[in-house]
Image: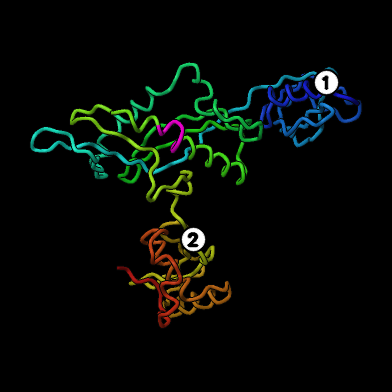
Amino acid sequence: MNVNREWLKFQREQYPAGSRIKLREMKDPYHPVPPGTMGTLKAIDDIGTFHVAWDNGSGLGVVMGEDSFTVLPPETHTLKLYMPMKVEYYETDEYGDMENEPTEMCSYDAVRCLDNISAALLRERSPEKAERGLMTYYDADDSVNQKVKSYHFTAEVRDDKLWGVAECQLIGELTPDELETLKEYVSGQASDGFGEGFEQREIKTPDGEIYAHLWQWDNWSIQTEAELFTPKLAEGLPELCFSTLPGTGDLICIKRGERGYYPSDWNTDDSQKNADLADYNNERLGVSEAQRQAMECGSMHGWNVPGADPAAYEQEAPQMGGMTLG
């Protein structure tokens, strides 16, 4: 079957992967999907077949003109890309003249300017580009262009620090390569495109004029929310280990990534027997003493502290006998 390439291109642009399909009628005479079934579009192949992952588990495709179905717009979700933001101002000398070189604002004062900077970024948005934002200038006809429907710059405060944020509206999920392509494009806009003009325009605040930079030479990066703010679990930790409570000697279980502990069904009234059971079960699970100590620390103090890394204990002599509060 020969299908017009322009028509195929139009269909793929109109109905991207991730679109929802609602079936009215399927002409398959043997195992048709029931009318009213919903599914998710996976792809449109070169002969115009809509390949659908139906919610009932079927994978039968449908074809316009043969089957009757409705294509619903795919839902979007937000991906945020974070970059450190620098804020500067110009001091005046004793004669009231402005200094030639700007002074960088400390983090505490920069955070106080969040509302002013966010408002300035919002004012930079042009109405004619409201639908796609800065994706308007993305000229590659690729999967990133299809998946990223829009993005705009804004600002946020996280961990007592001011961040520039590219808020992206996505259809579906980006592959690692697609994410890197998007990061590269956003980086270019932050440094040489949008950001180059933005950093030259003063922002008025109650304390005077400031200049905000989405990009700078030193210590700049662009990361997703998960990459930047999600606590990193120490590498080399098992899913589960056993220990004993200080004071009571009760046998407990510790699960990686979870605060606190769980009572063990094997707990006895004998603290020494519980300590032996903890050692026996950990050996059976392949849990080293360093891993056990790191798990104990993580369960009490959080999983992104240095003590939740087993490397912190590997040079020490074995410490048997359960958790130590401190």
SS at badge 1? loop
Residue at 54% over, 74% down: 281
- Asked if residue 326 lies in the magenta stretch, the reply is no
Q: Nearer the viewer, residue 287 or 317?
A: 317
Q: Using the image, determine if residue 191 lies above or below residue 252.
A: above
| Kind of residue at badge 1 | Asp
Query: Dot 2 surroundings within 10 Å: few (below 14), some, or many (20 or more)?
Result: many
Q: Using the image, determine if residue 288 lies above or below residue 5.
A: below
What residue sits right under mark 1 in the picture? Answer: 67
* Residue at far bottom of view: 317
Q: Which residues are magenta?
A: 190-196
Residue 243 circle label: none
Residue 256 circle label: 2
**Helix, strand or loop for the magenta stretch, by majority:** helix
* Residue at far left of view: 94
Residue at 47% over, 34% down: 189
Q: Earlier in the sequence, mark 1 or mark 2?
A: 1
